[in-house]
Amino acid sequence: MGEYLVIAGHYGSGKTTVSLNLALESAHAGKSVTLVDLDIVNPYFRSGDSAAELENLGIRVIAPQMLGTTSDAPSIRAEVMSAFDSPTDLTIFDAGGDDAGAAVLGRFREKLEQSGYTMLYVINAYRPMTRTPEDCAAILSEIEQVCRLKASGIINNSNLGKATTAQDILNSLPFAQELSRITGLPITAVNVTINTAPDLAGKAENLRVVKRLVKLPWEGENHDT
């Protein structure tokens, strides 16, 4: 039986960046990996857009293009359900943001509960609609209610894209800690880049170096999502 990991969060929180990094790290560690792209909310940032690169590394990618529509629903469901029928060591669900994405995730609630799952909530304190820990807690509550799954941890992915400094990440720590207090969920990781990591050593717990792998389609530069 493999491990099932759900990555959820608000628009722009960094779900796709987190999902891609976890998939790549696990594959490099010798694990068999499946990445399921359930993000129908944001057309610009989808893990399925990296399918060719991921599959070259042996990562199975399931990215139904019509997910969330009424078109060909049985075959779409069967495609996603194959992640349970033929499990890999790790299956990552890159869930869409808010109610629409949570509703799609909820279609697979029974299978996730039967198989056992971990759902991590990704936050970015610098996004406009999640300016306070209370905002983040409210959005998490909405996601949980719609998909009928429960988060068990928080990933602090607070950043300002390529302009992010170590101080920006340090400034986000009280925000994440207050969200942890409100929700009762532990902070499982504080995401940093290879450039900011040296200045944060010893100043924060659970540091995790991530690569910014997602780019805007109209630009050649990498951006976080």
Image (cartoon, rainbow, N blue to C red):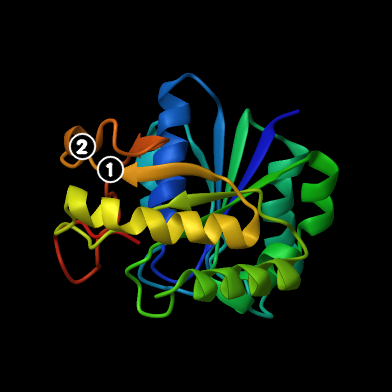
Residue at 67% in and 34% down: 3
Residue at 19% in and 48% down: 166
Q: Tell me if 189 is positioned left or right of 95 in this view.
A: left
Between the residue at mark 1 and the residue at mark 2, the CA separation in whole angstroms equals 8 Å
Say which of 65 and 25 sits in front.
25
Q: Residues within 10 Å of mark 1 (few under 14, many from 20)?
A: some
Residue behind mark 1? 211
Disc on the earlier residue, 1 or 2? 2
Q: Position of residue 70 (x, y in %)?
A: 69, 80
Say which of 141 and 90 sits in front.
141
Q: Position of residue 110 (x, y in %)?
A: 84, 55
Q: Position of residue 79 (x, y in %)?
A: 68, 54
Residue 80's disc is: none
Q: Amino acid at mark 2?
A: Ile
Say which of 102 and 84 sits in front.
102
Cβ–Cβ under 8 Å for marks 1 and 2: yes
